[in-house]
Amino acid sequence: MGNFRHETERLVLRDWRDEDWDLFWGATNTPEVMRWLGGVCDEDKRLAAQGRLLSYERDHGHTFWCIERKEDGAILGFCGLKRSNQAGGPMGLMEVGWRLREDAWGKGYAKEAASASLDLAFDRFGADEVVAFTVNKNVPSWGLMKRLGMRRREDLDFDSADFDDEDPTIIVYSIAREDWHG
C-alpha cells in the first residue's frame, strides 16, 4: 500500500503490512473482542475484511489503519477512517472506527488513536462531520464516542442484525468539524 504513518504520544497509526494480519487476527478475533462485531470470523470473513480495509485505503486514501504501540512494536488492533457503507446506514459519511485487542482495553489507547483519527478526518481529509456506529449493549464503545465529544444521532440510527441479533439497532454518534476540539 502507501506510506501512511501518523504518530501519537504512544502509538503509530500506519498502513498495513503483510506480516501484520496474523498478529492482528490472533489478538482481536476472539469471542470477547468480537462480541458486538458479528462474532469470531472464519478465514473467508477475515480475508474479506482485509480486502475491504485495503480497498478503503486505495479508493479513499484512508482506512482503519494498523495500530502499533511505540514502546514495543506490538500490534494493538486498528483505528481510523472509512466512508460509511453499512447497509441501511448513512452512506458515504466519514466514519471513525476502532478495534483493539483485549489486553489493550482500559489504557486510553482507543481514545488516543480515535482522537488522532478525528484530527486527520478534519485537517487532512476535509471532513465536515464524522460518524461512529455501535450497538446499544456496547457501552465501552459509545462511552468513548461521548468522551470524544460526539453526540447521539438517533435520526441516523438503523437496523442491522449483523452485530446483535437480539437488538438489531445500530446507534450512531457524530461530531462536526466546528465541535471538534482535538
Image (tube, rainbow, N blue to C red):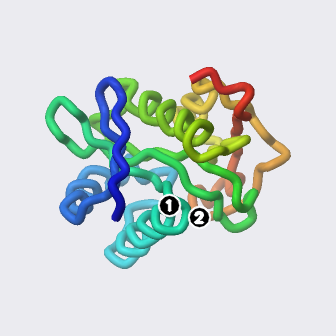
Image position, residue 55 (x, y; %): 47, 70
The quadrant the N terminus occupies is bottom left
Which residue matches tag 2?
162
Horizontal side, residue 41 vs residue 148: left or right: left
Local crowd size for mark 2, using a 10 Å CA cut-off: few (<14), some (14–19), many (≥20): some
* Left or right for 27, reference 175: left
Q: Nearer the viewer, residue 148 or 119?
A: 119
Quadrant hosting residue 173: top right
- x and y, in percent, of residue 160 in the image: 68, 62
User: Are dots 1 and 2 in contact, CB under 8 Å?
Assistant: yes
Residue at horizontal 32%, vertical 51%?
A: 28
Q: Is residue 167 above or below residue 147?
A: below
The residue pinned by badge 1 equals 38
Residue flagged by tag 1: what amino acid is it? Gly
- Residue name at image x 31 percent, y 33 percent: 11
Give the mark count.
Answer: 2
